[in-house]
Amino acid sequence: LSRLVGLFAESRIVWLKNLIIKTFISIYNVDMSESSRQNPEQFANFNDFFTRELAEGARNIVGDITCPSDGIISAMGKIEHNQIFQAKSLTYSLEKLLATSDVEGFINGSFITIYLAPSNYHRVHFPLDASLVAARYIPGNLSSVNQVTADSIPDLFADNERLVCELDTGQGPT
């Protein structure tokens, strides 16, 4: 089903992609005033819309702490040894979540899980003073990651398709 939805999301058939985008905006009450392109017909396909750019000034950095994306913080805390505690006794090993055995630099660090609802702006920003060291695509399932599924499906985040980005902040791995 996810792969079929993916075909529709990539469709460039004008009437179809416009219908999908306009329907999505209506159902999820998407605030298009925050988008650099506010007319749904300006997007090449649904995926282009879903990862839309923000309009200049839509987000202002205020204070010392910033969030890398819109969304709701569903879990955060310390990485204990090599385990991340997610919710309702669900834990993830760093090895499985990051799909590597090279996790030494992350042990006893911190983590944050941010849930992006369908209406949220779907881009992630790196800290201003960080540089991308590596990015690895990890193939996997395309299961929904809403709070209900995250709380009930073991290894959801470790089994789902994901991109693992390693940043250099000058303070160790991030």
Image (cartoon, rainbow, N blue to C red):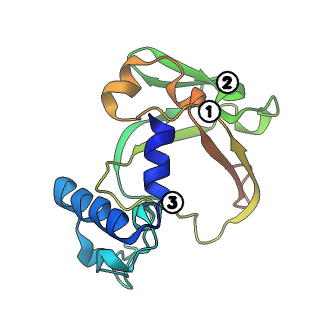
Total marks drawn?
3
- Tell me residue 119's x, y (percent): 28, 56
Q: Residue at x 37, y 49 (%)?
A: 116
- Tell me residue 150's x, y (percent): 40, 27
Q: Which residue is mark 3?
A: 124
Q: Residue at x 47, y 60 (%)?
A: 11
Q: Are marks 3 and 1 in contact (CB under 8 Å)?
A: no
Q: Is residue 114 left or right of residue 72?
A: right
Q: Are marks 2 and 3 in contact (CB under 8 Å)?
A: no
Q: Is residue 130 left or right of residue 58?
A: right
**Classed neighbour count for the residue bearing mark 2: other residues with Cα under 10 Å, few (<14), some (14–19), many (≥20):** some
Asked whether 159 or 104 is in front, the reply is: 159
- Tell me residue 103's x, y (percent): 76, 33
Q: Earlier in the sequence, mark 2 or mark 1?
A: 2
Q: Residue at x 44, y 34 (%)?
A: 1
Outermost residue, right side:
102
Q: Residue at x 67, y 37 (%)?
A: 139
* Disc 2, SS: loop
Asked whether 93 or 156 is in front, the reply is: 156
Can residue 35 be seen here?
A: no
Q: Which residue is mark 2?
A: 82
Can residue 116 be seen here?
A: yes
Mark 2–mark 1 Cα distance, whole angstroms, equals 22 Å
- Tell me residue 31's x, y (percent): 22, 68
Say which amino acid is labelled 3.
Answer: Val
* Disc 1, SS: loop
Q: Which residue is mark 1?
A: 140
In the image, residue 66 above or below residue 117:
below
